[in-house]
Image (cartoon, helix red, strand yellow):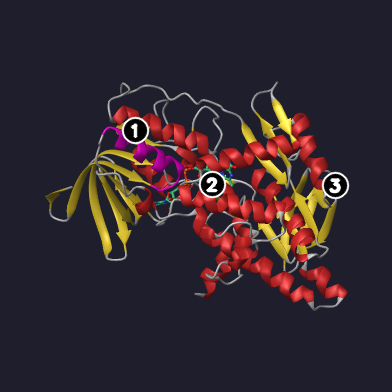
Amino acid sequence: MRNVDAGIEAADVVIVGSGFGGLAAAKQLNKSGVDYVLISSTPEHLFQPLLYQVATGVLPAADIAPPIAQVLRRHQGADVRLGKVVEIDADAAVLTYETEQGARKIRYGSLIAATGANQSYFGRDDFAEKTYSLKTIDDAQRLRAQIERVFAEAAGADQQTRERLLSFVVVGAGPTGVEVAGQLKELAKRYYHQEISVALVEGAGAVLPPFGGSLSEYARESLTRNGVEVLLDTFVTDIDDGKVTVKTKDGVERGIAAETVVWSAGVAAGGFAGLLAEATGCETDRAGRLLINQDCTVGGHADIYAIGDMTSLNGYPGQSPTAMQEGRHVADIIRRKKQPGTPFVYWDKGSMAVISRFSAVTKVSDKLKFTGVIAWTAWLAVHLFYLVGFRNRFIAVASWLVAFIGTGRPGFAETEKVAAAPAAEQRQAA
Ligand SMILES: Cc1cc2nc3c(=O)[nH]c(=O)nc-3n(C[C@H](O)[C@H](O)[C@H](O)COP(=O)(O)OP(=O)(O)OC[C@H]3O[C@@H](n4cnc5c(N)ncnc54)[C@H](O)[C@@H]3O)c2cc1C
């Protein structure tokens, strides 16, 4: 680290973001002993695919969110900082980031931006105040607190109040929505021994739309068998206290009781992606994702790379393998293992989604697909493999045995408790 002029430090490589993309890039740079500064607005490396298990008490929060400084502690050249990047001067190659001690500036030789994406409410930002999302560890803890609250209050209530309290609507039947809906039913049946209503609302004509065909159909049937009401070709038009209004493609409108609404429909890249677009002239798609070049550089700037969920390239999926592979690719260019300008090519190893205990779908290719226990076991194995830290893997296996073979929920024993209100409501109250 050098101080080049008053108040501006300099680093050869700056990574922004401690998610899948940022971590993969850091690990790859470390292989060649390249020094880097990693700035992230959150202190942890969050394993988002397991957020739903934190929300439903399967896993304690700490196990899917180890501090990034601890994950990278063996990297000699790592300098990890907590801060939010709020400005970029792309011509001067200087970032401004806010810390608890105030604003700081840093000049980069190469920049790797990996700041992910946020929830999208498709123009209805007021829905954020009325729903629970699953993007951050705080989101998962808030939803878990809400689940614990409604079940606790329902336990001693009359039937009408109980039915009201135990009504859930999940919006979006992608992997997260399907996992949450399936897991809620299982939680009610095997842990709380209560009847609940869960409606899964999806605007497209299939559950798990990217899977399609027989796998989508398997997921729909499996959810329905578990008692989830699956509403396809249906859009949420309004959310009031205790009620969600939906409208079908054919224009039929109805209200559904919903004490708890979980929103998992769509993503939008804002924040740093927007700043980068403005600073570099890089175009964005409708979701605000940067339309990066084939080598993951941004606009005409050979020293700025953007990767993962904040970007869109060749229709590659907005999933962790894309972010990790792009992270390794740009790190390889920076450490001179690949020529500058080398196009990134995504290696599709397949997709998987869990529906409930012993039930999942896995698509390796159009010809190679699995469902049921085999797919579910494969899902657990793959997620265990990528979960960071030996201790966390050990705890995950122990927790899965308790929750899936037994009927316990180790996550509910976690001592750190948060209030149950949705994130936006809490922000307003603060
Ligand atoms: C609930 C859920 C379930 C998922 N399940 C799966 C799954 O089963 N399989 C799969 O492959 N993918 C899954 N995904 C998608 C996967 O998690 C993402 O594709 C992946 O996290 C993208 O990695 P990323 O590095 O681009 O961004 P993220 O992992 O989101 O990391 C972004 C980082 O940037 C930081 N940051 C943001 N803004 C700033 C700023 N201005 N300054 C500094 N730091 C900033 C954040 O703190 C964070 O550390 C899931 C996602 C969610 C939300």
Q: Are marks 2 and 1 in contact (CB under 8 Å)?
A: no
Question: Hey, what amino acid is under mark 1?
Answer: Ala
Query: Which residue in the protein does label 1 denote?
Result: 331
Residue 235 image label:
none
Query: Crowding at label 2, few (<14), some or many (≥20) Cα neighbours within 10 Å?
Result: many
Question: Hey, what amino acid is under mark 3?
Answer: Arg
Q: Position of residue 364 (x, y in %)?
A: 64, 27
Residue sitting at 84 percent across and 57 percent down? 254
Query: Crowding at label 3, few (<14), some or many (≥20) Cα neighbours within 10 Å?
Result: few
Q: Position of residue 239 (x, y in %)?
A: 71, 62
Q: Is the shortest distance between ligand 1 and the CB of mark 1 under 8 Å?
A: no
Residue sitting at 31 percent across and 51 percent down? 80
Query: Which residue in the protein does label 2 denote?
Result: 268
Any magenta on residue 29? yes
Residue toward you, 165 or 35? 35
Residue extent of the magenta highlight = 17-32
- Closer to the chain start, of discs 2 and 1, is 2
